[in-house]
Amino acid sequence: MDVAAILGKRELEAGNGGMAPAGQFNLLRWFSLLSLVIIGTVAIGIGTVSTRFLVSESLERDAMLSAQFIQTLALGEMRHHGLEGMDMGDVLVPHHYGMLTKDAAASRERARSEFLDHLSHVPDSLLATIFSPDRKVIWSTNPELVGQQIDDDEALDEAFESGGRISAEYQDVEEGRVEQKFLRPPKMFFIENYIPLTDEQGQVKAMVEIYKEPVDLIDRVNRGYRMIWLATVIGGLLMYFGLYWIVRRASRLLAAQQAQLVANSTYVGLGEMSSAVAHSLRNPLASIRSSAELAQEMEGPQARKCIDDIITQVDRMSAWVRDLLLCLRPLQGDSEKVEPMEAVRASLANFDQQLARSNIQVVCSDAEAPAVVSHQLLLAQVLNSVIANAIEAMPGGGCLSITATPDAGGQWLHLAIEDTGKGMSRQQEMMAFKSFYTTKQGGLGIGLIMVKQIMERFGGKASLSSREHQGTRVCLSFKVAAQDS
């Protein structure tokens, strides 16, 4: 893998908070799934509401027309037979016949007979029944129902009490209802209509109950179903594919812009790295050349010194190259539970000789700290880098203090590493975590960058505070690992 590709990958990781991304967000895939669910749900909802509205309105319209037809038919029969001032309820109830003359009784009988004949031939009728005010069947197209008393029909009671038309829709015959004894079984759903016959004062004299299986209405409703669902499906698909096309283009544009951004960041990183490497390698190369020229002319100890200088400078350049490769290499390793103070003591042990030679006193907390989320090897790299910086900041001796403090909620552990070195200025402090920035002679400025990236890789944080001639404090904040149950 070339340097540009490596830097590009590191820029992507830096753009994600220093952590290697678990997986890139696929805008097109998530939009296609979520929009399909949302548009499908909306389309189904619209289709369902529309079809229900169509059915309810159609049935309501049919019931209203049936009621108007029956009531108009009753009024027409009364006028046709010269029974002005009377109503059909009086004609249908038998006990009123005793008060009439022979001619009047004959006229009322003809009016009743013709009305019932018309009622028995209502189109799509399954059953027609007339109730008296005491809920007794006085006539029905099913003779078996005549004379029966209906006392437990809530719809019938409501129709008599309200004096208005009441409709109901049924899918199946209810076995417990006596009045649903049809002459032929319905093939599909059927409608029950209660149509009151009232006098001039609005009092209900009789109640007509008609069960209808509206074949023509059912055909129209089915056609309406098909049209509504077809329009809903086509509209939903057009909306989905239209939005999908827009988001697809947007996704491609974002991908192209992201690739361009990565490329630009890569070139910026290459420029910074090239400048740092060129600046850092110039002096060692000059020293190597001078030492080599002198070694050509000298013998004995002087030649040995020049050769040692060459080896030393080559080692310095090798260390820089190693640090650069380590900085550019993607972080590897899964998170695990780590004992932070054990890692601190192990790192301090690696610097025993340097600490003693620099006359640095170490003050390390002996209190045990909770396990944290990190990685054993990467945490050792973090601690080694911070401790090495602290030692270099105190060439004339000083104190290195390390303390671990859990937060009040027990969710975080703050590990503070403080030195009493020369410290930094405000500008140096702000630039401390910038790439290739360093205050050390011969350094590359990648140590604290690696510290920050490793800490953020495992959900932690790294911060720095410093004051000139007073020292520097680096705070490493770790997430406390969950306790094993």
Image: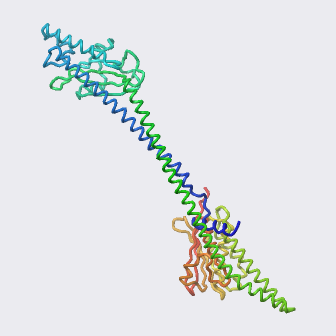
Q: Is residue 346 above or below residue 189?
A: below
Q: Residue furthest right?
A: 300
On the question of residue 370 being in view, the answer is: no
Is 93 positioned to the left or the right of 387 in the image?
left
Q: Quadrant of residue 127?
A: top left
User: Is residue 282 at least partly visible in the picture?
Assistant: yes
Q: In this view, does 210 lie above or below 240?
A: above
- Counting every numbered tag in the picture gives 0
Q: In this view, does 444 lie above or below 198?
A: below
Please indicate whether residue 313 sits to the left or right of residue 232 in the image. right
Instruction: Give me the residue at 28% from left, 17% from top.
Output: 119
Residue 209 location (% of width, % of height): 29, 21
Position of residue 335 measured from the top left corner of the image (x, y, whole percent): 64, 62
Q: Where is residue 435 in the image (x, y as percent from the top left)?
A: 61, 75
Question: Foreground: 219 or 431?
Answer: 219
Determine the residue positioned at 80% across, 86% down.
308
278 to 214, vertically: above or below = below
Q: In which quarter of the image is residue 113?
A: top left
Residue 409: x percent and y percent? 51, 65
Q: In this view, does 131 lie to the left or right of 389?
A: left
Which residue sits at x=50%, y=53%? 246
Task: In this rendered view, identify the residue nearer to me: 304 or 290.
Answer: 290
Q: Which of 175 and 101 is in front in this view?
A: 101
Q: In which quarter of the image is the N terminus?
A: bottom right
